[in-house]
Amino acid sequence: MRRIGLDEWSGLAMLVVCLGAGAPVPLGLVTPGVPVPLWVALFLTAVVAVVAAVAEVGPVPARRAAYGVAVAAGWAVVVTAPQAGLLPILLVVLAALGAEVVRLPTNLAVIVLNTGVIALATHRSHGDGIEFVMTAAFYGLIQLATLFSLTAIGRERRLRRELAQAHVDLQAASVLLAGSARAAERLRISRELHDLIGHQLTVLTLELETARHRRDEAAWDHVERANRVARDVLADVRVTVGALRAGPATDLADALRDVGRDVPGLDVVVDVDDDVEADEEQTAALVRAVQEIVTNTLRHAEAGELRVGVARDRDAIRLTATDDGRGAAEVVPGNGLRGITERFAALGGDVAYDGASGFRLTARMPVR
Protein backbone atom coordinates (compact mmCIF):
# COMPACT_ATOMS: atom_id res chain seq x y z
CA MET A 1 0.00 0.00 0.00
CA ARG A 2 1.35 3.40 -0.94
CA ARG A 3 2.28 5.72 1.91
CA ILE A 4 0.58 9.12 2.06
CA GLY A 5 3.23 11.79 1.70
CA LEU A 6 3.41 15.46 2.59
CA ASP A 7 2.11 16.51 -0.83
CA GLU A 8 -1.07 14.49 -0.32
CA TRP A 9 -1.61 15.87 3.18
CA SER A 10 -1.01 19.41 1.91
CA GLY A 11 -3.54 18.95 -0.89
CA LEU A 12 -6.08 17.53 1.56
CA ALA A 13 -5.59 20.51 3.87
CA MET A 14 -6.15 22.91 0.95
CA LEU A 15 -9.33 21.07 0.02
CA VAL A 16 -10.63 21.29 3.59
CA VAL A 17 -9.85 25.03 3.69
CA CYS A 18 -11.75 25.60 0.44
CA LEU A 19 -14.76 23.62 1.61
CA GLY A 20 -14.73 25.51 4.91
CA ALA A 21 -14.60 28.87 3.12
CA GLY A 22 -17.60 27.96 0.98
CA ALA A 23 -19.63 26.32 3.78
CA PRO A 24 -21.61 29.44 4.85
CA VAL A 25 -23.61 29.48 1.60
CA PRO A 26 -25.03 25.92 1.66
CA LEU A 27 -25.54 26.27 5.43
CA GLY A 28 -27.82 29.27 4.80
CA LEU A 29 -25.57 31.78 6.61
CA VAL A 30 -24.95 33.77 3.39
CA THR A 31 -27.35 34.34 0.52
CA PRO A 32 -25.62 34.39 -2.87
CA GLY A 33 -26.69 36.49 -5.85
CA VAL A 34 -27.75 33.34 -7.75
CA PRO A 35 -29.86 30.35 -6.67
CA VAL A 36 -28.08 28.33 -4.03
CA PRO A 37 -28.07 25.06 -6.09
CA LEU A 38 -26.42 26.92 -8.96
CA TRP A 39 -23.87 28.47 -6.63
CA VAL A 40 -23.06 25.08 -5.07
CA ALA A 41 -22.70 23.59 -8.57
CA LEU A 42 -20.24 26.36 -9.51
CA PHE A 43 -18.31 25.87 -6.29
CA LEU A 44 -18.04 22.09 -6.77
CA THR A 45 -17.06 22.65 -10.42
CA ALA A 46 -14.15 24.82 -9.29
CA VAL A 47 -12.99 22.25 -6.72
CA VAL A 48 -13.34 19.21 -8.96
CA ALA A 49 -11.74 20.95 -11.95
CA VAL A 50 -8.67 22.06 -10.01
CA VAL A 51 -8.22 18.58 -8.54
CA ALA A 52 -8.36 17.15 -12.08
CA ALA A 53 -5.84 19.74 -13.23
CA VAL A 54 -3.21 18.95 -10.60
CA ALA A 55 -3.75 15.17 -10.52
CA GLU A 56 -1.18 14.67 -13.34
CA VAL A 57 -3.58 12.37 -15.17
CA GLY A 58 -4.19 12.91 -18.86
CA PRO A 59 -2.52 15.17 -21.41
CA VAL A 60 -1.22 18.60 -20.46
CA PRO A 61 -3.70 20.57 -22.65
CA ALA A 62 -6.63 18.83 -20.95
CA ARG A 63 -5.21 19.63 -17.51
CA ARG A 64 -4.73 23.27 -18.47
CA ALA A 65 -8.30 23.43 -19.77
CA ALA A 66 -9.53 22.00 -16.45
CA TYR A 67 -7.53 24.65 -14.62
CA GLY A 68 -9.13 27.36 -16.75
CA VAL A 69 -12.57 26.01 -15.88
CA ALA A 70 -11.66 25.99 -12.19
CA VAL A 71 -10.49 29.62 -12.28
CA ALA A 72 -13.58 30.81 -14.17
CA ALA A 73 -15.90 28.97 -11.79
CA GLY A 74 -13.96 30.38 -8.83
CA TRP A 75 -14.51 33.92 -10.11
CA ALA A 76 -18.25 33.32 -10.46
CA VAL A 77 -18.42 31.87 -6.95
CA VAL A 78 -16.62 34.82 -5.33
CA VAL A 79 -18.50 37.54 -7.25
CA THR A 80 -21.93 36.04 -6.53
CA ALA A 81 -21.29 35.63 -2.79
CA PRO A 82 -19.37 38.77 -1.72
CA GLN A 83 -20.56 38.49 1.89
CA ALA A 84 -19.00 35.04 2.37
CA GLY A 85 -16.02 36.42 4.28
CA LEU A 86 -13.07 34.12 3.66
CA LEU A 87 -14.31 32.83 0.30
CA PRO A 88 -11.49 34.64 -1.62
CA ILE A 89 -9.18 32.01 -0.11
CA LEU A 90 -10.52 29.76 -2.89
CA LEU A 91 -8.84 32.04 -5.44
CA VAL A 92 -5.62 32.02 -3.40
CA VAL A 93 -5.59 28.21 -3.54
CA LEU A 94 -6.33 28.25 -7.28
CA ALA A 95 -3.44 30.64 -7.88
CA ALA A 96 -1.08 28.51 -5.79
CA LEU A 97 -2.01 25.27 -7.55
CA GLY A 98 -1.53 26.93 -10.91
CA ALA A 99 2.22 26.48 -10.42
CA GLU A 100 1.67 22.75 -11.09
CA VAL A 101 -0.22 23.30 -14.35
CA VAL A 102 0.60 26.55 -16.17
CA ARG A 103 3.71 28.61 -16.73
CA LEU A 104 4.71 31.47 -14.45
CA PRO A 105 3.57 34.37 -16.74
CA THR A 106 0.12 32.78 -17.07
CA ASN A 107 -0.01 32.24 -13.35
CA LEU A 108 0.84 35.88 -12.69
CA ALA A 109 -1.94 36.93 -15.07
CA VAL A 110 -4.37 34.72 -13.13
CA ILE A 111 -3.29 36.42 -9.89
CA VAL A 112 -3.90 39.86 -11.36
CA LEU A 113 -7.39 38.83 -12.53
CA ASN A 114 -8.09 37.12 -9.19
CA THR A 115 -7.17 40.31 -7.38
CA GLY A 116 -9.52 42.29 -9.62
CA VAL A 117 -12.35 39.84 -8.89
CA ILE A 118 -11.68 40.08 -5.14
CA ALA A 119 -11.68 43.88 -5.38
CA LEU A 120 -15.02 43.81 -7.22
CA ALA A 121 -16.59 41.45 -4.68
CA THR A 122 -15.32 43.51 -1.74
CA HIS A 123 -16.59 46.71 -3.34
CA ARG A 124 -20.05 45.14 -3.78
CA SER A 125 -20.19 44.12 -0.13
CA HIS A 126 -18.56 47.16 1.51
CA GLY A 127 -19.05 49.96 -1.00
CA ASP A 128 -16.54 52.71 -1.67
CA GLY A 129 -13.67 53.36 0.66
CA ILE A 130 -10.20 52.19 1.40
CA GLU A 131 -11.29 48.80 2.76
CA PHE A 132 -11.89 47.09 -0.57
CA VAL A 133 -8.52 48.33 -1.87
CA MET A 134 -6.69 47.02 1.20
CA THR A 135 -8.53 43.70 1.03
CA ALA A 136 -7.69 43.22 -2.63
CA ALA A 137 -4.05 44.19 -2.03
CA PHE A 138 -3.86 41.82 0.94
CA TYR A 139 -5.15 38.84 -1.03
CA GLY A 140 -2.98 39.80 -3.99
CA LEU A 141 0.16 39.72 -1.84
CA ILE A 142 -0.88 36.38 -0.33
CA GLN A 143 -1.30 34.93 -3.82
CA LEU A 144 2.12 36.18 -4.91
CA ALA A 145 3.85 34.89 -1.79
CA THR A 146 2.17 31.49 -2.08
CA LEU A 147 2.94 31.21 -5.79
CA PHE A 148 6.62 32.10 -5.41
CA SER A 149 7.00 29.74 -2.46
CA LEU A 150 5.44 26.79 -4.29
CA THR A 151 7.43 27.60 -7.43
CA ALA A 152 10.66 27.53 -5.43
CA ILE A 153 9.64 24.27 -3.74
CA GLY A 154 8.77 22.72 -7.09
CA ARG A 155 12.09 23.81 -8.58
CA GLU A 156 13.97 22.33 -5.62
CA ARG A 157 11.99 19.10 -5.98
CA ARG A 158 12.91 18.86 -9.67
CA LEU A 159 16.57 19.50 -8.90
CA ARG A 160 16.53 16.82 -6.22
CA ARG A 161 14.96 14.37 -8.64
CA GLU A 162 17.55 15.18 -11.30
CA LEU A 163 20.32 14.79 -8.74
CA ALA A 164 18.95 11.41 -7.66
CA GLN A 165 18.76 10.25 -11.30
CA ALA A 166 22.35 11.40 -11.90
CA HIS A 167 23.37 9.50 -8.76
CA VAL A 168 21.79 6.29 -10.09
CA ASP A 169 23.41 6.74 -13.50
CA LEU A 170 26.81 7.32 -11.89
CA GLN A 171 26.43 4.24 -9.67
CA ALA A 172 25.52 2.06 -12.65
CA ALA A 173 28.38 3.44 -14.74
CA SER A 174 30.82 2.81 -11.88
CA VAL A 175 29.63 -0.77 -11.50
CA LEU A 176 29.95 -1.52 -15.21
CA LEU A 177 33.31 0.25 -15.45
CA ALA A 178 34.67 -1.69 -12.49
CA GLY A 179 33.42 -4.93 -14.06
CA SER A 180 35.09 -4.06 -17.35
CA ALA A 181 38.35 -3.26 -15.57
CA ARG A 182 38.26 -6.59 -13.69
CA ALA A 183 37.47 -8.45 -16.90
CA ALA A 184 40.41 -6.79 -18.67
CA GLU A 185 42.76 -7.62 -15.79
CA ARG A 186 41.65 -11.25 -15.72
CA LEU A 187 42.17 -11.51 -19.46
CA ARG A 188 45.67 -10.08 -19.09
CA ILE A 189 46.51 -12.56 -16.31
CA SER A 190 45.16 -15.48 -18.31
CA ARG A 191 47.26 -14.47 -21.31
CA GLU A 192 50.40 -14.18 -19.20
CA LEU A 193 49.78 -17.57 -17.61
CA HIS A 194 49.35 -19.10 -21.01
CA ASP A 195 52.35 -17.33 -22.57
CA LEU A 196 54.85 -17.67 -19.72
CA ILE A 197 54.03 -20.99 -18.04
CA GLY A 198 52.12 -22.82 -20.72
CA HIS A 199 54.86 -22.50 -23.33
CA GLN A 200 57.57 -23.55 -20.89
CA LEU A 201 55.61 -26.60 -19.78
CA THR A 202 55.03 -27.52 -23.39
CA VAL A 203 58.77 -27.39 -24.07
CA LEU A 204 59.42 -29.45 -20.92
CA THR A 205 56.90 -32.03 -22.05
CA LEU A 206 58.59 -32.30 -25.47
CA GLU A 207 62.02 -32.65 -23.89
CA LEU A 208 60.78 -35.42 -21.60
CA GLU A 209 59.07 -37.14 -24.48
CA THR A 210 62.40 -37.17 -26.33
CA ALA A 211 64.25 -38.50 -23.28
CA ARG A 212 61.78 -41.40 -22.98
CA HIS A 213 63.03 -42.81 -26.25
CA ARG A 214 66.66 -43.00 -25.17
CA ARG A 215 68.07 -46.40 -24.08
CA ASP A 216 69.12 -45.41 -20.57
CA GLU A 217 66.71 -47.70 -18.67
CA ALA A 218 67.74 -46.38 -15.23
CA ALA A 219 66.44 -42.89 -16.01
CA TRP A 220 63.33 -44.04 -17.84
CA ASP A 221 61.07 -44.27 -14.76
CA HIS A 222 62.00 -40.75 -13.60
CA VAL A 223 61.44 -39.35 -17.05
CA GLU A 224 58.01 -41.01 -17.22
CA ARG A 225 56.94 -39.55 -13.89
CA ALA A 226 58.24 -36.10 -14.80
CA ASN A 227 56.37 -36.31 -18.10
CA ARG A 228 53.11 -37.08 -16.31
CA VAL A 229 53.63 -34.23 -13.85
CA ALA A 230 54.36 -31.77 -16.67
CA ARG A 231 51.26 -32.83 -18.57
CA ASP A 232 49.12 -32.51 -15.44
CA VAL A 233 50.47 -29.03 -14.71
CA LEU A 234 49.86 -27.99 -18.33
CA ALA A 235 46.26 -29.24 -18.11
CA ASP A 236 45.74 -27.31 -14.85
CA VAL A 237 47.08 -24.12 -16.44
CA ARG A 238 44.69 -24.52 -19.37
CA VAL A 239 41.73 -25.04 -17.02
CA THR A 240 42.72 -21.97 -14.97
CA VAL A 241 43.09 -19.82 -18.07
CA GLY A 242 39.70 -20.99 -19.34
CA ALA A 243 38.05 -20.21 -16.00
CA LEU A 244 39.59 -16.75 -15.91
CA ARG A 245 38.32 -16.01 -19.40
CA ALA A 246 34.81 -17.42 -18.98
CA GLY A 247 33.89 -16.58 -15.36
CA PRO A 248 31.82 -13.50 -14.46
CA ALA A 249 33.89 -10.40 -13.76
CA THR A 250 31.27 -8.76 -11.53
CA ASP A 251 29.44 -10.08 -8.49
CA LEU A 252 25.80 -9.69 -9.53
CA ALA A 253 24.32 -9.09 -6.07
CA ASP A 254 26.90 -6.45 -5.13
CA ALA A 255 26.54 -4.76 -8.52
CA LEU A 256 22.75 -4.42 -8.28
CA ARG A 257 22.92 -3.25 -4.67
CA ASP A 258 25.48 -0.62 -5.64
CA VAL A 259 23.11 0.77 -8.29
CA GLY A 260 20.34 1.29 -5.73
CA ARG A 261 22.50 2.29 -2.78
CA ASP A 262 21.88 5.68 -1.11
CA VAL A 263 19.32 6.90 -3.66
CA PRO A 264 17.88 10.19 -2.31
CA GLY A 265 14.19 9.90 -1.50
CA LEU A 266 13.83 6.22 -2.40
CA ASP A 267 14.51 3.06 -0.40
CA VAL A 268 15.79 0.40 -2.82
CA VAL A 269 15.83 -3.20 -1.55
CA VAL A 270 17.71 -5.74 -3.71
CA ASP A 271 17.53 -9.51 -3.19
CA VAL A 272 19.56 -11.87 -5.42
CA ASP A 273 19.29 -15.65 -4.92
CA ASP A 274 22.53 -17.56 -4.40
CA ASP A 275 21.91 -19.95 -7.30
CA VAL A 276 21.75 -17.17 -9.92
CA GLU A 277 24.73 -17.27 -12.30
CA ALA A 278 24.99 -14.64 -15.02
CA ASP A 279 27.77 -14.03 -17.50
CA GLU A 280 29.22 -10.59 -18.19
CA GLU A 281 26.69 -9.66 -20.88
CA GLN A 282 23.72 -10.79 -18.76
CA THR A 283 25.09 -8.94 -15.74
CA ALA A 284 25.39 -5.75 -17.79
CA ALA A 285 21.78 -6.15 -18.97
CA LEU A 286 20.54 -6.64 -15.40
CA VAL A 287 22.52 -3.64 -14.12
CA ARG A 288 21.15 -1.40 -16.88
CA ALA A 289 17.63 -2.69 -16.24
CA VAL A 290 17.81 -1.88 -12.53
CA GLN A 291 19.26 1.53 -13.39
CA GLU A 292 16.31 2.31 -15.68
CA ILE A 293 13.80 0.96 -13.14
CA VAL A 294 15.19 3.13 -10.32
CA THR A 295 15.29 6.19 -12.59
CA ASN A 296 11.70 5.67 -13.79
CA THR A 297 10.55 5.20 -10.20
CA LEU A 298 12.15 8.49 -9.18
CA ARG A 299 10.75 10.28 -12.21
CA HIS A 300 7.18 9.02 -12.35
CA ALA A 301 6.08 6.82 -9.45
CA GLU A 302 6.32 9.13 -6.41
CA ALA A 303 7.17 5.98 -4.46
CA GLY A 304 8.94 5.56 -1.15
CA GLU A 305 10.18 2.00 -1.62
CA LEU A 306 11.33 -0.11 -4.56
CA ARG A 307 11.94 -3.86 -4.22
CA VAL A 308 14.09 -5.67 -6.78
CA GLY A 309 14.54 -9.45 -6.88
CA VAL A 310 16.63 -11.70 -9.13
CA ALA A 311 15.98 -15.44 -8.97
CA ARG A 312 16.55 -18.64 -10.91
CA ASP A 313 13.32 -19.82 -12.55
CA ARG A 314 14.08 -23.25 -14.02
CA ASP A 315 16.13 -22.49 -17.13
CA ALA A 316 15.75 -18.72 -16.87
CA ILE A 317 16.90 -15.77 -14.80
CA ARG A 318 13.90 -13.74 -13.59
CA LEU A 319 14.08 -10.08 -12.59
CA THR A 320 11.12 -8.58 -10.70
CA ALA A 321 10.71 -5.00 -9.52
CA THR A 322 7.76 -3.52 -7.59
CA ASP A 323 7.25 -0.10 -6.02
CA ASP A 324 4.63 1.41 -3.72
CA GLY A 325 3.98 4.39 -5.98
CA ARG A 326 0.83 5.62 -7.63
CA GLY A 327 0.98 3.27 -10.65
CA ALA A 328 -0.92 3.95 -13.86
CA ALA A 329 -4.12 2.59 -15.34
CA GLU A 330 -2.40 2.37 -18.74
CA VAL A 331 1.38 2.12 -18.92
CA VAL A 332 2.85 3.94 -21.92
CA PRO A 333 6.42 2.67 -22.39
CA GLY A 334 9.04 5.35 -22.77
CA ASN A 335 12.69 5.10 -23.72
CA GLY A 336 13.57 3.40 -20.43
CA LEU A 337 11.08 0.54 -20.69
CA ARG A 338 11.81 0.11 -24.39
CA GLY A 339 15.51 -0.07 -23.62
CA ILE A 340 14.96 -2.82 -21.03
CA THR A 341 12.77 -4.76 -23.46
CA GLU A 342 15.35 -4.51 -26.23
CA ARG A 343 18.23 -5.65 -23.99
CA PHE A 344 16.36 -8.71 -22.76
CA ALA A 345 15.06 -9.53 -26.23
CA ALA A 346 18.65 -9.48 -27.54
CA LEU A 347 19.47 -12.13 -24.92
CA GLY A 348 16.45 -14.26 -25.86
CA GLY A 349 14.21 -13.00 -23.06
CA ASP A 350 11.04 -10.96 -22.60
CA VAL A 351 9.60 -8.21 -20.37
CA ALA A 352 6.12 -7.67 -18.91
CA TYR A 353 4.83 -4.82 -16.73
CA ASP A 354 1.64 -3.34 -15.27
CA GLY A 355 0.67 -0.37 -13.11
CA ALA A 356 -2.54 -1.60 -11.51
CA SER A 357 -1.16 -1.35 -7.97
CA GLY A 358 2.06 0.60 -7.89
CA PHE A 359 4.29 -0.46 -10.76
CA ARG A 360 5.51 -4.01 -11.35
CA LEU A 361 8.00 -5.25 -13.94
CA THR A 362 8.97 -8.86 -14.65
CA ALA A 363 11.82 -9.66 -17.05
CA ARG A 364 13.24 -13.05 -17.98
CA MET A 365 16.26 -14.28 -19.91
CA PRO A 366 17.44 -17.86 -20.53
CA VAL A 367 20.34 -19.24 -18.50
CA ARG A 368 23.49 -19.69 -20.55
Image (tube, rainbow, N blue to C red):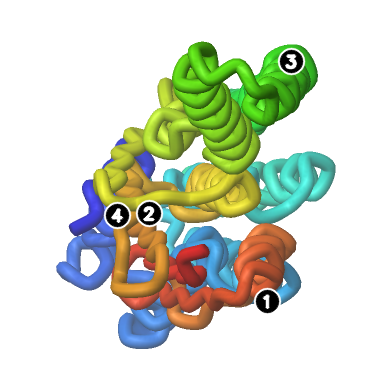
Q: Earlier in the sequence, mark 3 or mark 1?
A: 1
Residue that label 4 marks: 324
First in residue order: circle 1 vs circle 4:
1
Residue 314, by quadrant, is bottom left
C-alpha separation, residue under disc 1 versus residue under disc 4: 27 Å
SS of the residue under disc 1:
helix
The mark found on residue 62 in the picture is 1
Q: Earlier in the sequence, mark 2 or mark 4?
A: 2
Of the residues under marks 1 and 2, which one precedes in the sequence? 1
Q: Nearer the viewer, residue 287 or 31?
A: 287
Instruction: Give the percent coordinates (x, y) of residue 78.
Output: 49, 59
Judging depth in this view, the residue of 277 and 83 nearest the camera is: 277
Q: At x 60% / y 38%, what residue is drawn?
A: 242
Q: Which mark is residue 83?
A: 2
Element marked by disc 4 = loop
Q: Please provide percent x and percent y for residue 311.
A: 30, 58
Identity, as a three-letter code, of the amino acid under mark 2: Gln
User: Marks 4 and 3, how far apart in space?
Assistant: 61 Å
Residue that label 3 marks: 200
Contact? badges 4 and 3 (CB < 8 Å): no
